[in-house]
Image (cartoon, helix red, strand yellow):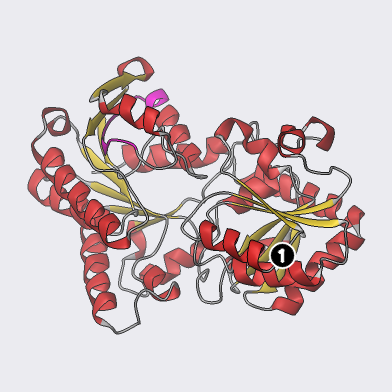
Amino acid sequence: MKLLMLTTYYEPEQAASYYLVDNLNEAFAAAGIETVVYTPTPTRGISKEVREEYKRRSKETLQGGMRTIHRFPMYGEGQNVILRALRYVLICICEFFLGCFARDARRCQAIYVVSTPPIQGAMAALVKKIRGIPFVYGLQDIFPDSLVSTGIAKKGGMAWKIGRMIENFTYRNADRIIVISEEFKRNIMAKGVPKEKIEVVYNWVDGDTVADIPREQNVLFSRYGLDPAKFHVTYCGNIGLTQNLDMLLDVAKTLEQNDDIQFVLVGNGAYRQQLEQQLSQNSIGNITLLPFQPYEDIAHVFSLGDVSLVISKPGTGAGSVPSKTWNIMAASRPVLASFDDGELRDIIEQNRCGLFARAGDKDAFREAVLRLYSDRNLCLEMGRNGRRFVMRHLTKETGTQRYVEIIKNLK
């Protein structure tokens, strides 16, 4: 079987969840599913030298011929919102024609795309209509709900209405929709998607790769001059507009008098520059910003803190369980969630693997930090509980096998 994958981002680009794609590629190849990938020249999280090198790689064949990657030229991604939106549109136009007419694409019997950018699914639906082959949609983010939660659009406004049209068109034409939580499933069923179309597959974690790294062996402490004797509260992931990092700064400021508590933020994103400016202007000395780290150091990243954060602004996390949650738990660290009520809260509280504070509740968030700081044995116990939950329910083998079954059972 040959599977057509049309994607906006691909290796060697960097993002916290890219390991999922690597794991899937390995599982597909092992199951006899050959993947044909069409993607633009890489741009995100790489150097100019790497980008120039990949401009010369129009085609690669990997995994003993089981994966073929075709790259087409596209200008680099910047911070300008309009240029980024235009880039998404141009990528989808290119992938539409490649998916319909390119020789390798014509040999594929099914299509798989994920929900970034939101128009990607609609593009794949059009390819399906022309090619007459089934289409599987990986729903990692619900659009246009995400536009409303970030303040980009208002519910009922023009952008929202257009987004709903795109969303409905995609769902209607997808043969299978893979969602990452039960709340995602309930969300799209309420929008008219038949239950039989939806498959719930939580984003998994590789428990062999992400595990507890003892502090004395963690390379990040020496690399960045961090004090191993202090209590570290870490955030790892996208530094963007929805993560409520302004509240985090406010709470950190109130805890400055406690020299033992240090906050470490690891990652990049659209809000990082503003965050750096705020740290400087407000003279907040107990927060350290580190750059995005390579995947080979992922266990060190998630083992860096005594506790690790899942945080968002009110209304932006409803129905979501961020993938970083599983990495935190796999590293035997307690999860401190400042998040909307829902499935994430249930998982944390029912399995006693962390503490939960409602999104935007500054006092509750601060009290949770202090509770974990004052009870290190509780941190260790919650960390062990989280690791146990991941290894029972969210292994790489379990997650990737579900994808293989979904793809192979397409009709």
Can residue 133 be seen from the camera position used here?
no
Check residue 33 for magenta coloring. yes
Against 408, is 86 above or below? below
Magenta stretch: give its range. Answer: 29-42
As drawn, is 150 to the left or to the right of 113? Answer: right
In screen coordinates, is 271 left or right of 115? right
Q: Which quarter of the picture shows residue 244?
A: bottom right
Number of on-image labels: 1
Q: Label 1, on which residue?
A: 283
Instruction: Find residue 100 and report its horizontal and vertical position in percent.
Output: 10, 41
In which image quadrant can residue 33 be found? top left
* Badge 1 element: loop
Residue at point 79% right, 72% down? 254
Residue 58 is left or right of residue 52, and the answer is left
**Mark 1 crowdedness (10 Å alpha carbons): few <14, some 14-19, many ≥20:** few
Side of 218 where 235 appears, left or right: left
Residue that extends furthest to the bottom in the rendered view of this protein: 156
Q: Quadrant of the C terminus?
A: top left
Asked whether residue 320 is drawn in magenta, I would say no
Q: Nearer the viewer, residue 191 or 265?
A: 265
Residue drawn at x 16%, y 33% as measured from the top left: 105
Q: Position of residue 170 (x, y in %)?
A: 24, 60
Q: Amino acid at mark 1?
A: Ser
Quarter of the image that includes the N terminus? top left
Is 285 in front, or is 347?
Answer: 285
Residue 39 visible in the picture: yes
Identity of the residue drawn at 55% across and 57% down: 322
Q: Where's residue 269, x and y in %?
A: 49, 54
